[in-house]
Amino acid sequence: MHRSLADAERFSGACGGADVNKMLSSILKTMARGEQAEMRCLPAFCGGEEPLTITATVSDWVVVEPLPRTKEKVIKKILLAAPSEVWERPSEDASCTANLTVRNAASGEVVDEMAGKTFIQGNGDVLRCIDVAAREMKRGERALISAPAEWAYGDEDFKALSAAAGMEEAAVEVEMELVDFEQGKSIYKMDLFERAAFQVRKKEQGNSLFRKGKYEEAIRKYEAGNSAVPNAEDLKESTLPEAEKEGAKAEARKTQVACLVNVAACKLKLDDFKGAIQASDTALEVDKDNFKAFFRRAQARLKLGDIDEAKADLVAAGKIDPKSREVRVELDKIKKKMAENKSRDKNLYGGMFR
């Protein structure tokens, strides 16, 4: 189908300048494989000088789509669809087995080839484009993954690989067959200790991504970790002694707050100041005396120009940690900002009542 749409420009020249691409786009999306249809269009719709009739037959098509969470930078083209009865896809932490052939997109040269490669989805074991593609594939599916350098050997985690030599700035094409996978253990089947370990692991993965400047990916790890926080029903169903339940609950809340203030830090880096405030608010609902939550919220409010609210948060943070140099630095910024505002107002209104 993509070749037909590309040829539309050539057809337009032979059809008096009518927009054949527009006509095909309109009709093809309503058709089934093997269907033939006729479309008649007036110049008011497709341009040109006279009415135009197109007969189109859909012999077959190939699904080509951008992958989620890649800002449409990584594209998947299905080469062989999974059997129709197969519906399940790997979730995060699934153990995947795949056959992989990585090529330089420009030259077509094979860079790396791996048969039966096993990796944990979301663990950073394979190129980022392969990792994200696994989440969108079904068992038995074969696809061509196209990705820019930053999603391949340009990523700092893979620059040291022997296969990466000379590929740091090169786009890649990966022929990938998802042979099999085994889902990771569902949160709902974890006991309290397993949930705690899962939380900590996701927090550490998020911290690693944060240090690399991958803030959006870090947020997803922090949020995944917090999805394991046990609720009242989970605690009720646990067979642990009450003292151990309370200990597990306390540890879960502690990690939850740490993830939330880290989400706030990511949001600040992404200039999502309202998002940083929201994450900080949630952290303070769990721990009303959390220094970092007050501090992050103050930073966000200062960026939004909410000086009084920012000052109140910094004062609250200063009461928790009176020796904090960070608080003093931010308070100095507020004093400077308030002085600038006062000077500006004086210049603006100073002569109005003379």
Image (cartoon, grey):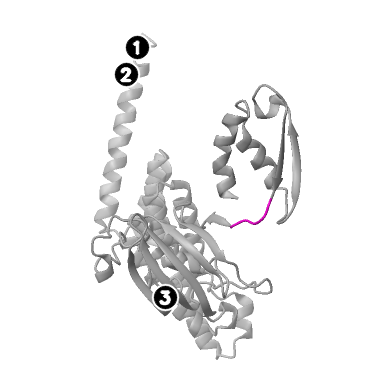
Q: Secondary structure at mark 3?
A: helix
Q: Nearer the viewer, residue 86 or 121?
A: 86
Residue 324 lies, in percent from the top left, at: 27, 57
Q: Which mark identifies residue 246? A: none
Q: Residue at x 43, y 47 (%)?
A: 273
Hey, what amino acid is under mark 3? Answer: Val
The image quarter containing residue 128 is bottom left
The C terminus, quarter of image: top left
Foreground mark, 2 or 3, reads 3
- 10 Å crowding of disc 2: few (<14), some (14-19), many (20+): few
Residue 200 bears which disc, if any? 3
Question: Mark 2 belongs to which amino acid?
Answer: Asn
User: Which secondary structure dominates the residues rendered in magenta?
Assistant: loop
* Nearer-the-camera pick, 347 or 248: 248
Label whose residue precedes the other's in the sequence (2 or 3): 3
Q: In percent of the image, x 28 and y 42: which residue is there?
A: 333
> Where residue 292 sits in the image (x, y, percent)?
37, 59
Would residue 314 be found to the left or right of residue 63 on screen? left
Which amino acid, mark 1? Gly
Secondary structure category for the residue under label 1? loop
Q: Marks 1/2: CA distance?
A: 8 Å
Q: Is residue 167 magenta?
A: no
How far is mark 2 from mark 3, CA to CA? 54 Å
The reply to whether the C-beta atoms of the residues labelled 1 and 3 are less than 8 Å apart is no
Which of the 4 quarters of the picture holds residue 230?
bottom right
Q: Is residue 235 above or below residue 52?
A: below
Query: Residue 351 — which label?
Result: 1
Magenta residues span 58-62
* Vertical arrangement, residue 308 with respect to residue 236, above or below: above
* Residue topped by disc 2: 347
Question: Where does residue 182 sit, x and y in percent of width and height?
Answer: 53, 81
